[in-house]
Image: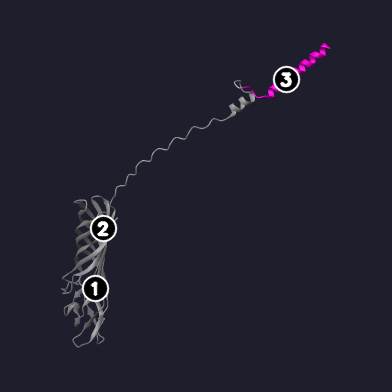
């Protein structure tokens, strides 16, 4: 009987312990082992993201002049030689004329620029009686000239808006003589065909510009002179024509262009 009583007492003790294990722990007592493992396995919260640095103040890029592109009126004087290529004297002269010019000035450095230019003009050749060996009076002869090239221009800055330069370089040009009519003493007429020639020119110049609208628009004036060399073409050689009677006649050469003077005034867009 005593053994039975001891077994019952042991069973009651085990049942009480199991009931107490299922109940929550009283306040102030340490947590159960399972709760402690959950607390250890939980990840800590990441630290707060630091604030972004303040943006630096915007600094404007300094303005730099690069290219001036423009155009304007050009007074062009093509100076004819007093003797023809064949060595004979010639009274033919080329009248001065208004034309137009285009240019672009690229600033390599502050004190040196590269000037590109183009000049075109129409002229009238003075043809007194007997000019070019023709048997009669020639009607006004129209001719056209153009030239283009490049020049280096050392530049001085006289202020924030005024600058001046001298320039020298090389270019290529062409003269084109239109066909014209000749009236003979007997009243008959005949035509002389058109001819042309090309030349190399060595220009030098002096100019100035003033910015009427800073960083946008400038007015420019320039005076340019040039020596011509290496002139070639059928306008400088003898030609032939058929007169009103059907006879073949010789037509003398036009004189070479010894040099040129060009004065331009215009506006440039500053880029």
Element carrying mark 1: strand
Residue at point 20% right, 74% down?
Answer: 125
Mark 3, residue position: 16
**Which one is in front, 230 or 146?**
146
* Secondary structure predominantly adopted by residues drawn in magenta: helix
> Is 113 inside the magenta-drawn segment?
no
Task: Tell me whether the residue at label 3 lies in contact with that at label 2, contact meaning CB atoms closer than 8 angstroms.
Answer: no
Q: Secondary structure at mark 2?
A: strand
Vertical arrangement, residue 99 with respect to residue 140, above or below? above
The local crowd at label 2, few if under 14, some if 14 to 19, many if 20 or more residues have their Cα within 10 Å, is some
Q: In this image, 4 relative to 87: left or right?
A: right
Name the residue tied to disc 1.
143
> Which mark is on residue 217?
2
**Is residue 219 at least partly visible in the picture?**
yes
Q: At which x and y percent is residue 222?
A: 20, 60
User: Quadrant where the C terminus lies?
Assistant: bottom left
Residue placed farthest to the top in the image? 2
Q: Residue furthest right?
A: 1
Q: Which residues are magenta?
A: 1-26
* 23 in magenta: yes
Say what secondary structure mark 3 lies in: helix
- Which mark, by number, is residue 55? none
């Amino acid at each position: 009987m005593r053994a039975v009583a001891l077994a019952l007492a042991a069973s009651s003790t085990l049942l009480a312990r199991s009931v107490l294990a299922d109940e929550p722990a009283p306040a102030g007592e340490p947590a159960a082992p399972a709760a402690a493992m959950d607390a250890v396995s939980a990840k800590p919260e990441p630290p707060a993201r630091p604030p972004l640095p303040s943006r630096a103040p915007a600094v404007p890029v300094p303005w730099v002049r690069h290219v001036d592109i423009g155009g304007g009126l050009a007074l062009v004087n093509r100076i004819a030689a007093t003797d023809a290529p064949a060595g004979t004297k010639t009274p033919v002269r080329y009248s001065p004329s208004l034309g137009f010019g285009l240019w672009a000035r690229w600033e390599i450095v502050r004190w040196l620029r590269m000037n590109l230019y183009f000049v075109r003009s129409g002229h009238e050749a003075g043809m007194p009686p007997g000019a070019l060996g023709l048997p009669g009076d020639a009607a006004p002869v129209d001719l056209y000239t153009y030239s283009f090239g490049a020049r280096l221009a050392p530049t001085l800055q006289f202020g924030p808006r005024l600058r001046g330069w001298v320039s020298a370089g090389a270019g290529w040009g062409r003269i084109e003589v239109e066909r014209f009519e000749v009236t003979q003493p007997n009243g008959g007429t005949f035509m002389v065909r058109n001819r042309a020639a090309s030349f190399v020119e060595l220009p030098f110049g002096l100019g100035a510009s003033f910015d009427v609208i800073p960083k946008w628009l400038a007015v420019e004036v320039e005076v340019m002179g040039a020596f011509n060399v290496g002139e070639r073409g059928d306008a400088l050689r003898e030609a032939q024509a058929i007169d009103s009677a059907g006879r073949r006649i010789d037509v003398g050469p036009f004189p070479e262009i010894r040099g040129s003077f060009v004065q331009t005034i215009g506006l440039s867009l500053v880029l």
